[in-house]
Amino acid sequence: MKATHYFHGVKIPGRVSRFSVWFNGDPRGDTSSLSVVVDGERFDRAGRSYPLTAAEIDALITGPWSASTWGAFNG
């Protein structure tokens, strides 16, 4: 599945780590229930990256979360 939107500096309430997440579909709008997490990474305080767990993917799908940078891929 191809990613259409990206979000970096994602913060999930209650978590210290930051995340970068790639979605198919925009998770912010009226069609947010149709968006799917394509890939992502969790970054700890030391800057090490880890793959997303099932619980983290669920938290990113159901929200709430915030991101410092986001956008859409052209084409």
Image (spheres, grey):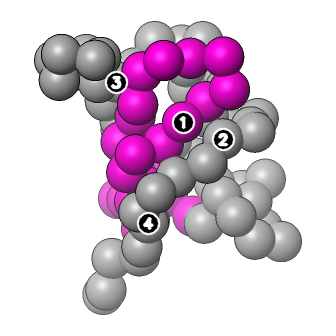
The CA distance from mark 1 to mark 4 is 13 Å
Identify the residue under disc 2: 65
* Image: 75 above or below 40: below
Q: Which residue is mark 4?
A: 70
Q: Answer whether labels 1 and 2 touch (C-beta < 8 Å).
A: yes
Q: Give amino acid for label 4.
A: Trp
Asked if residue 36 lies left or right of residue 38, the reply is right
Label 4 crowd (10 A; few <14 / some 14-19 / many >=20): some
Give how far across and how far down residue 70 sits, in percent.
44, 66
* Disc 2 to disc 4: CB gap under 8 Å: no
Circle 3 packing at 10 Å, graded few (<14), some (14-19), many (20+), is some
Displayed quadrant of residue 54: top right
Upstream in sequence: badge 1 or badge 4: 1
| Residue at the spot of label 1 | 11
Instruction: Check disc 1 and give the amino acid type.
Output: Lys
Is residue 74 visible in the rendered image? The answer is: yes
Q: Name which residue type carries label 2.
A: Trp
Query: Mark 3 sits on what residue?
Result: 42
Residue 40 in the magenta stretch? The answer is: no
- N-terminal label among 3 and 1: 1
Does dot 4 land on a helix, a strand or a loop? strand
Circle 2 Cα neighbour tier, 10 Å, few/some/many (<14 / 14–19 / ≥20): few
Locate residue 35 relative to residue 47 in the image: left or right. right
Q: Residue at x 75, y 39 (%)?
A: 64
Mark 3 → mark 4, Cα distance in angstroms: 16 Å
Q: Residue 23, percent across and down?
A: 48, 53
